[in-house]
Amino acid sequence: MTSARFLQIHTLHSYTASLLNRDDSGLAKRLPFGGVMRTRISSQCLKRHWRMAKDDPHALANIAGVELDVRSRNIVEKRVLNSLRSSFENDLVDALSGPFQKAVYGDKGEDQSNRQPLLLGEPEITWLKDQASKIAQEAQGDAKQAKTLAEAWAKDYKKNTKAMRDQTKLPGGISAALFGRMITSDVEANIDAAIHVAHAFTVHPEESESDYFTVVDDLQGQDEEAGASHIGETELNSGLFYGYVVVDIPALVDNLGGDTDLAAKVIHNLVYLIAEISPGAKRGSTAPYGRADLMLVEAGNRQPRSLANAFQTPALPKLEDAIAKLQDHVKRLDETYATGEDRRALTLWNGELNMAERVSLENMAQWAAKQLNASSGD
């Protein structure tokens, strides 16, 4: 089996009358490409939905050996200090807040409005709980002493957390191991992403309409003022989206503490999540659920390259046209660069698929996971 350093995952997903990812004005996110405007789904939106799909059979949380994580600006208060309140007086616990907030969130961490949400793994949170409990016990009921001890502890926070992370598998949790994290207050805690996710965009010009709607008051009598109780307007979009994900296999194994078996399970489940989990706001009024119309997975050892340029000249908003453009682009890349990627594909389209061997989703996930063993030499 050929050694693979990278897995490249390309998808086409179709959604109808939906508002998958909104900007600050409540409109669909957009992207100009090829001289026309496209509807866009941000990479952050995609990653969050894959990460938070905890009830899915292929959820990352269901993998044995995975450590979970929490992204919040209230971890110290809600996960660390609140765990002590049943054992210690509130004034003593409150005395720990300032030093712990500053240690975790930076010098301005005492003020919640100045904190940025941080991604911390459950092992890191458990360590913080243990440290806070030890300080509270040592203070012996003296809140002033607790604050003094916490301030002394905070001075060595970065050094001690680094030592803890060096001795702990997945200290930052599975999300950080996959998608990376940045902690500006502690650069030693930064983790480089092993999985790179592009913004998804429609392969054709945006298709959008303004949806006029009314709300009728059920208790409004016939003798009362006629008309709707509320009138509103929202945007709806339809589109066939191209998505692109790169897995850096050696980086993934490294971020998972060298555990190749765990990395293979992560890749297996990730393929399922990318194919089956839909992003989307306004779920109650648009039911924006769908599965990949096409998934192409490539294994290779050369620098990855997106297939987005297949749609620089917009396609028709039809699956067969998008696949034809994709296959033509892959053919031209192969003829020009001959990088030798091994490929598998699945699709709901019933036409000829000549760019890759056609498989089911389960076979795709199993094949992708096996590429890790090829890369690691097992």
Image (tube, helix red, strand yellow):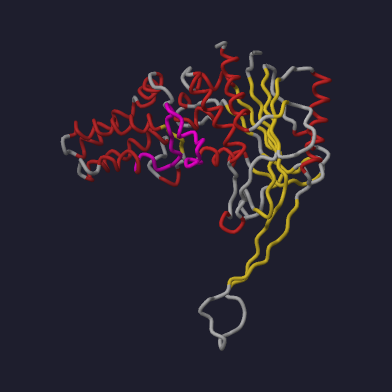
Note whether residue 23 is visible. no
Q: Which residues are magenta?
A: 53-77
- Residue 191 location in percent, x, y? 51, 26
Which residue is at the front of the view, 311 or 364? 364
Which residue is at the front of the view, 6 or 126? 6
- Residue 264 location in percent, x, y? 53, 23
Residue at x 61% of width, y 30% of height: 196
Residue 68 drawn in magenta: yes
- Residue 361 location in percent, x, y? 62, 33
Q: Residue furthest bottom?
A: 223
- Direction from residue 91 to residue 99 in the image, left or right: right
Residue at x 38% of width, y 40% of height: 75
**Quadrant location of the C terminus in the rendered image:** top right
**Position of 116 relative to 248 (above/below):** below
**Position of 216 relative to 146 (above/below):** below
Residue 184 drawn in magenta: no
Which residue is at the front of the view, 188 or 219? 219
Which residue is at the front of the view, 335 or 56? 56
Task: Give residue 127's quadrant in the image.
Answer: top left
Residue at x 80% of width, y 18% of height: 337
Task: Give residue 233's quadrant in the image.
Answer: bottom right
Residue at x 69% of width, y 26% of height: 344
Q: Residue furthest top?
A: 377
Note whether residue 303 is visible. yes
Q: Residue furthest left?
A: 140
- Direction from residue 116 to residue 367 in the image, left or right: right
